[in-house]
Image: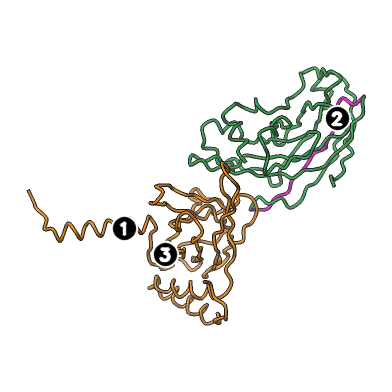
Chain colours: A orange, B green
Amino acid sequence: MKTFPVQQLLALYIATLAIGLAGCSTTGHLVPPSEANISAVYGYIDMSDAPTGLQWITMKKLQPRSDTPYYHFYVDDGMFYRSEIPPGTYKFWEFGGFSQWKNTDYTFQFQGQGKGEMDRVIDRQGLYFAGCYRYTRIKTGFFSPNKFDLEPIEGDCERETLERLARWSKDATWNRLISQRLSELRPVATSRP
Amino acid sequence: MRWLAVLLLLGPGGCAGLSEPDSAGNLDGSDIVLAGRITLDPPLRPDEQELQMLGSSRYRDRLLVAVGPEAIDMREPGFDTLRNAAMVTLGEVFYVRVPRRDTLVYSGGSILMNAHRSGRMDYLHLPGTVHFRTRQDDEIIYLGTLVYHRDVYNGITGVEIIDEFDASRQTFLRHFGRAMRTRRANLEELQ
């Protein structure tokens, strides 16, 4: 029987703990566009007021119709992003995360009817900013499910999010588009807290 | 929000308080028939309603309409709202027997668009809140053909009321086998 030194077992335990504390969110690099019309979408949600951190967020393609309409995003500390998005009309669908403290999975649904503030029409290749928002809880009293609102965050949030996104881009096309957009954004006096 | 979930559990529109009149259109004096047709433009595609939840497929191409003495907020209805609701089929002429009141309010409808295995349910709400007066001798009040125009996000961009009164009277005659006293609803926006 193979034995493990104490240091290796300790390292394994710490790694497992770290993965557990980080939750289920996943990160990865923007994929080089396979075609000339492939885009990327990014944004940020401050979940400080939510019962869980942001660990996943999905978007649904409304048009053109598809057998696989749901698009899942990478998440990095409130920032969400993904590439490989073809032209179409999209609607943000759900977001949420798992609270280890409460051992509960939280799912927050975007409004199913009507165009939401984050929803984008992607018509040509580019970086599409879905916006920066702060989750705010709307209390509804005992025995009623809590509601939420996503308040837009003003200030430098897009620039800060793009700078973070740049760390997840190794591809020349995305690097060029990120740099181009960063050069258009000027730092403003107020910033998110 | 959860009333359609209750409907799913209790049966195919069986717990909606309003129902069709009998095939001969027999009414006692306390009821009146509201007739009309509701369509979507563009119409629902066959796969557009994602009805995965057990029992939810019976809501394909159907909607819940609300008619009663008072306006109902279809987005935040209570359980008692069901007393003033009926399940009808999109695109087909409907007949709903409604307790007679001097004034009735049409509060729109709700289409179950998503009933996912995860528990997520979404509705396409059709706005209403128009009212109309009735007379003692009315048997059928004709609402018209309501065409709800929608965008790709299922936002309602306009409502068109098409008057097909003369053709509808013939339809009513065939349906009930007798001429019933029929009058157009004089729709007025609820203040």
Whether labels 3 and 1 share one chain: yes
Per the image, the residue denoted by label 2 is B101
Which residue does the image show at 60% across and 42% down from the upper left? B113
Looking at the rendered structure, the secondary structure element under dot 3 is: strand
Residue A75, x across and y down, in percent:
43, 61
Which residue does the image show at 55% across and 80% down from the upper left? A185
The answer to whether residue B144 is magenta is yes
Horizontal relation, residue A49 to residue B88: left or right: left
Label 3 with label 1: CB-CB less than 8 Å: no
Looking at the rendered structure, the secondary structure element under dot 2 is: loop
Looking at the rendered structure, the secondary structure element under dot 1 is: helix
The mark nearer the N terminus, 3 or 1, is: 1
Per the image, the residue denoted by label 1 is A19
Residue A192, x across and y down, in percent:
53, 72
Which residue does the image show at 70% across and 50% down from the upper left? B150
Horizontal relation, residue B176 to residue A22: left or right: right
Establish if A77 lies above or below A114: below
Which label sits on residue A76?
Answer: 3
Q: Which residues are magenta?
A: B137-152
Q: Chain of mark 2?
A: B
Nearer to us: label 3 or label 1? 1
Q: Chain of mark 1?
A: A
Residue B39, x across and y down, in percent:
73, 40
Quarter of the figure with residue B176: top right
- Callout 1 amino acid: Ile
